[in-house]
Amino acid sequence: MRLSSLLTPALAGLAFLLGGVAAAQDIYSCVDARGRTLTADRPIAECTDRAQRALSPSGMVKRQIGPSLTAHEQSAQDEKDRRAAELRAREAEERRRDKALLLRYPTPEVHDRERAAALLQIDEIIKASNKRRGELADQRKSLGGELEFYVKDPSKAPGSLKRRLEENAGDVAIQQRFIADQEQEKKRVNQRFDEELAKLRLLWALANPPAGSGASGSRTVRN
């Protein structure tokens, strides 16, 4: 008797605990394709093609499950997720570039100075090329003086003179193309700095908002 009296409270306690665990389990509910409301203690197989609700023992909706996707639907969802991931990656990269741009050009004056330095470097190259063109013009003039001796019959001009004239003409053409390329490079540099400036104006405004909404709080950005 004493042993059974000791076991009874223990068994009662165990039953109470097991009952509490069972009561704490979620209850799944859905309306199947035939319009029937189904409930179970686990996800319902008849409702894999539609939404199911996971309810607490008190009847509160804890979450919604599904519906399960077909192979075609899953493929479409995967593609949607891939595009979303690519968009997030592009946005993150753009934020990184904006941050780097702002660190490099904290003020309009810094940006103006770097533009001027880049253009000056190209102008120095063009200046050197123009100097070379002048030297070639002097050389052509000298060769032309030698050619005057054969003006009546150019075919009698020595081969070395003809080669020097051809080389001179080729060098002049090279310098002309080189200068034209440098002029195009100046346009590209200016375009790049113009595009950067448009972006930087927004970044500067965000980084240094006006103190007030009035004109005194605004900031003027030079071109």
Image (cartoon, rainbow, N blue to C red):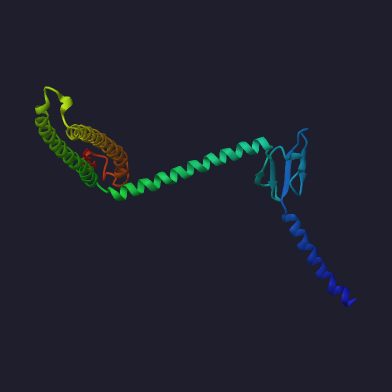
Q: Where does the N terminus fall, quadrant-wise?
A: bottom right
| Depicted 52 relative to depicted 141: above or below | below
Q: Where does the C terminus fall, quadrant-wise?
A: top left
Residue lying at 76% horizontally and 56% vertically, measured from the top left: 22
The image shows residue 95 at horizontal and vertical percentages of: 40, 46
Q: Is residue 128 left or right of residue 31?
A: left
Residue lying at 70% horizontally and 50% vertically, measured from the top left: 58
The image shows residue 188 at horizontal and vertical percentages of: 28, 36
Q: Quadrant of residue 152?
A: top left
In the foreground, 186 or 24: 186
| Depicted 32 relative to depicted 63: above or below | above
In the foreground, 92 or 151: 151
The image shows residue 167 at horizontal and vertical percentages of: 21, 35
Q: Is residue 79 left or right of residue 56?
A: left
Q: Is residue 220 left or right of residue 69?
A: left
Residue lying at 87% horizontally and 76% vertically, measured from the top left: 3
The image shows residue 105 at horizontal and vertical percentages of: 27, 47
Which residue, as the protein is rendered here, is positioned at the far top? 152
Which residue, as the protein is rendered here, is positioned at the far right? 1
